[in-house]
Image: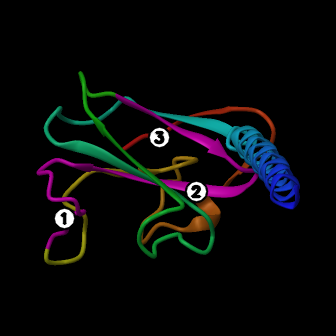
């Protein structure tokens, strides 16, 4: 009798524990599943690429990452008829800047002349016309609740 009662309680505890774990896993997966789609989309078009050779590389930056390597999101696109379109998805609200360049020789870096001037075309959000290195404040834009469409000129 004791063994039967113990077996019954063990099976019932095991079943309750399994149901509890299943419920917890389901609740967490639902929560994180919805959390992944909370940002907005930023669609970037560049329509003046000088050739279809290579790729165009784009980086979405915050003030902390600007001109310091990879952005918070990075993208690459093949060029078709001098044009590319890329979408950064689920971007959370905040201030950002986009830097892009035409990697014509596909060496995954921007190439420069001996005097430091770029050999490959580049551009930034807001299309600032500046002499010297890119400036975050010139390229900065704000992401709020609505999707954005930006056009960058090389």
CA distance for labels 2 and 3: 11 Å
Query: Is 70 situated left or right of 61 in this image?
Result: left
The 10 Å Cα crowd at callout 1, few under 14, some 14 to 19, many 20 or more, is some
Establish if 110 lies above or below 35.
Answer: below
Q: 87 or 50: which is nearer to us?
A: 87
Badge 3 element = loop
Which mark, residue 97? 2
Q: Is there a contact, CB below 8 Å, between mark 2 and mark 1?
A: no
Which mark, residue 111? 1
Name the residue: 33% across, 32% down: 48
Q: Earlier in the sequence, mark 1 or mark 3?
A: 1
* Residue 15 lies within the magenta run: no
Q: What stretch is highlighted in magenta?
A: 84-113
Which mark, residue 152? 3
Name the residue: 54% across, 48% down: 125
Quadrant in the picture for residue 47: top left
Name the residue: 16% across, 47% down: 104
Q: Quadrant of the C terminus?
A: top left
């Amino acid at each position: 009798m004791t063994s039967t009662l113990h077996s019954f309680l063990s099976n019932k505890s095991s079943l309750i524990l399994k149901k509890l774990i299943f419920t917890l896993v389901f609740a967490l997966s639902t929560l994180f599943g919805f959390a992944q789609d909370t940002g907005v989309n930023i669609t970037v078009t560049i329509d003046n690429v000088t050739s279809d050779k290579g790729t165009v590389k784009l980086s979405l930056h915050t003030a902390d990452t600007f001109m310091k390597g990879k952005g918070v999101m990075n993208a690459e696109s093949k060029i078709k008829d001098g044009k590319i379109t890329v979408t950064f998805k689920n971007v959370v609200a905040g201030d950002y800047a986009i830097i892009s360049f035409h990697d014509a020789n596909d060496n995954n870096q921007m190439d420069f002349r001996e005097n430091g001037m770029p050999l490959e075309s580049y551009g930034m959000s807001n299309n600032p016309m500046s002499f010297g290195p890119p400036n975050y404040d010139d390229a900065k834009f704000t992401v709020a609740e609505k999707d954005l469409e930006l056009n960058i000129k090389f």
